[in-house]
Image: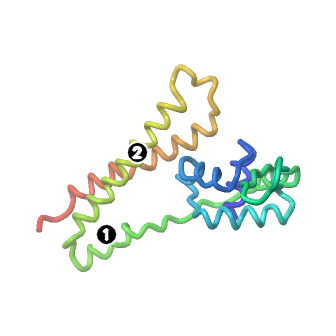
Amino acid sequence: MSLPHAILTALLERPSSGLELTRRFDKSIGFFWPATHQQIYRELGRLEASGHIRALPQAGPARGQKKEYEVLAAGRAELERWTAEGSDPRAVREPLLLRLRAAAVVGSAGLDAELRRHLALHQAQLADYLRIEQHDFPAERADDENRLQHAVLRAGIGLETFWVEWLTATLGALPAD
């Protein structure tokens, strides 16, 4: 149920076309709530049909022009309701952890390469997050920035830092072949 709320959030930040939304998802919201372009376009249709958003009027013929969407009062009310709603933390469902558990039973042959691959991916993601933080939330503008958006980014930095440290330690704990 969170994809429509992610879209409502993005549209409240700035009215956008479906294409602009998918690009913004790829650079921000998608880091913690990924969605395919097809999912976003499908959800835009549902949100419009439910009266939560509307396509802005276009100057000139509509054929061939991209629709730009804005959030209506009902969409804002839904996002406010959902934001205040409680939810329990989700259980971790990480295939790598299951592979490690299986390796304890059947042996760890080949696991080294997979752990190193994951380490490289998490190091790259951490570097991306740190670049975003430096660019979007510099220390000299800390009072001017949106503290909640920065808190979300800091959560991503913390998670990637955890994975880098954990993978490094786990690689060191693998039995020698």
99 or 75, which lies in front? 75
Q: Residue at x 23, y 64 (%)?
A: 113
> Does residue 101 appear anywhere in the picture?
yes
Q: Residue at x 60, y 62 (%)?
A: 37
Q: Position of residue 65 (x, y in %)?
A: 73, 54
| Real-space CA distance between mark 1 and mark 2, rounded to the nearest whole angstrom | 23 Å
Mark 2: which secondary structure?
helix
With respect to residue 154, does 45 lie above or below? below
Drawn side of residue 30 relative to residue 48, left or right: left
> On the rendered image, what quadrant is the N terminus found in?
bottom right
Count of numbered labels shown in the rendering: 2
Mark 1 or 2: in front is 2
117 or 37, which lies in front? 37
Q: Position of residue 143 (x, y in %)?
A: 62, 23
The residue at which mark 1 appears reads as: 100
At label 2, the amino acid type is: Leu
Mark 1: which secondary structure?
helix
